[in-house]
Image (cartoon, rainbow, N blue to C red):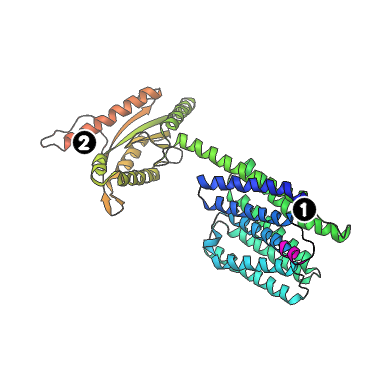
């Protein structure tokens, strides 16, 4: 007969699986795929619970599927919440870990009473987690401390399994509680910005983890025959799902905002963000009675690279130039891509009288060294125009116009100096020393 109380949860989790499957079609990422696998196992868990064949053979089979699906969902949650790909970092350890969890669930459901199989399985489980623990530590990944914490916690919990008389109930509750707690800790560690979505997801994982020890304590002290209602066990999973979807939504909003303000090729601020920072820089300079500068740099010879080697090589070259220039510019300043082969630098709070000129010389020297792109050694020169606030102007428009005029004067000077018999201009043109 059917267990009708499982139908609403089955429908809800089927909808969740569809949502994550739709997300995977547009975002083919490891994390999305792992979340989809996790929710598919949760759906399988409730599908097995929907059918109730009593205590017979098929009832035991369905109970086995239900429990093992819940274990696999926990592993998938841990994998999805991790910053690193555990399947690549420690594939053997992860495989043995999953096999040991499935074996423990099978021993419980099929009513094995001998203690030796449980001891062997717990030893294998501890060994597999130990392999993953030391593998992660050896690679010095960001999950180092978190995995150390979870490893120690698991050892403590499994020690309780070994000394506890109720190997079946206590062991399953311990494993499930540990899996959800580990997933919650990893989810917290994954994101540097603790947004509403991240906090909601972590709260859901912690709630799912606490259900099992709370029920264990209540059964042991107050209500020996207590069974957790299916709605109570499902509620934390819905909170987890809401947190994950909120996190993805927040990520997409942040990515959209970043693309609107940054150059897609180099990742540098675009003209829109550059103009906003320029206004802020001049307002701060006026308020603090300090000097600031705008440097405009144009690459000479970049068109020949595009024409000779193609736009793909040209794009890689621009990315390399952006990285090289970014190493020279201070963190407090702004390096932006303001055109095809044109970059702009905003220099704030200039303390030295010739601070902007020194930076300009450093930028030009960086361009003197060839840049390796694929099998080519490419080289360009640069022309820089500069305007200093308040010496050359007090508004963004006047300073940009002055810097732009100086840059084109430098470019004409560079072209003229390459012609036979060309005379050096009397203008103050920046060039490598």
Residue 254 x %, y %: 53, 38
Residue 373 x %, y %: 31, 51
Q: What kind of element bears circle 2?
A: helix
Q: Which residue is mark 1?
A: 3
Disc ID at residue 414: 2
Residue 319 x %, y %: 36, 45
Q: Is residue 93 left or right of residue 383?
A: right
The earlier-in-sequence mark between 2 and 1 is 1
> Badge 1 local density, few (<14 within 10 Å), some, or many (20+)?
some
> Which stretch appears magenta?
54-62
Quadrant of residue 125 within the rendered picture? bottom right
Looking at the image, can residue 123 be seen?
yes
Please say if 245 is above or below 169.
above
Magenta stretch: dominant secondary structure: helix
Q: Is residue 57 magenta?
A: yes
Q: Residue at x 41, y 29 (%)?
A: 291
Residue 294 x %, y %: 37, 31
């Amino acid at each position: 007969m059917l267990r009708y109380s499982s139908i609403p949860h089955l429908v809800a989790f089927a909808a969740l699986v569809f949502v994550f499957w739709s997300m995977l079609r547009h975002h083919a990422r490891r994390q999305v795929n792992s979340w989809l696998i996790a929710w598919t196992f949760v759906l399988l868990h409730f599908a097995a619970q929907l059918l109730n064949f009593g205590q017979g053979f098929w009832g035991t089979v369905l109970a086995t599927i239900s429990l093992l699906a819940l274990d696999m969902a926990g592993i998938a949650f841990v994998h999805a919440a991790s910053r690193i790909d555990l399947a690549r970092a420690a594939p053997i350890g992860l495989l043995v870990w999953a096999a040991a969890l499935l074996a423990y669930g099978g021993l419980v459901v099929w009513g094995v009473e001998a203690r030796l199989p449980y001891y062997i399985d717990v030893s294998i489980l501890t060994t597999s987690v130990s392999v993953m623990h030391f593998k992660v530590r050896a690679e010095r990944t960001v999950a180092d401390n978190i995995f150390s914490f979870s490893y120690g916690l698991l050892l403590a919990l499994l020690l309780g399994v070994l000394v506890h008389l109720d190997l079946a109930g206590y062991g399953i509750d311990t494993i499930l509680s540990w899996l959800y707690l580990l997933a919650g800790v990893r989810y917290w560690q994954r994101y540097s910005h603790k947004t509403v979505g991240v906090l909601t997801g972590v709260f859901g994982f912690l709630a799912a983890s606490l259900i099992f020890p709370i029920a264990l304590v209540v059964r042991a002290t107050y209500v020996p025959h207590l069974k957790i209602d299916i709605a109570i066990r499902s509620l934390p999973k819905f909170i987890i799902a809401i947190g994950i979807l909120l996190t993805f939504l927040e990520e997409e909003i942040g990515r959209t905002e970043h693309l609107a303000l940054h150059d897609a090729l180099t990742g540098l601020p675009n003209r829109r963000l550059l103009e906003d920072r320029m206004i802020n820089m001049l307002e701060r300079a006026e308020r603090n009675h300090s000097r600031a500068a705008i440097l405009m740099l144009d690459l000479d010879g970049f068109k020949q690279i595009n024409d000779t080697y193609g736009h793909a090589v040209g794009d890689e070259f621009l990315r390399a130039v952006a990285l090289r220039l970014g190493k020279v510019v201070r963190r407090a300043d702004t390096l932006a891509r303001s055109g095809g082969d044109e970059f702009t630098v905003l220099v704030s709070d200039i303390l030295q009288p010739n601070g902007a000129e020194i930076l300009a010389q450093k930028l030009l020297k960086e361009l003197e060294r060839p840049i390796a792109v694929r099998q080519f050694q490419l080289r360009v020169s640069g022309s820089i125009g500069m305007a200093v606030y308040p010496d050359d102007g007090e508004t963004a428009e006047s300073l940009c116009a002055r810097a732009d005029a100086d840059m084109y004067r430098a470019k004409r000077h560079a072209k003229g100096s390459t012609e036979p018999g060309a005379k050096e201009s009397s203008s103050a043109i920046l060039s490598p020393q």
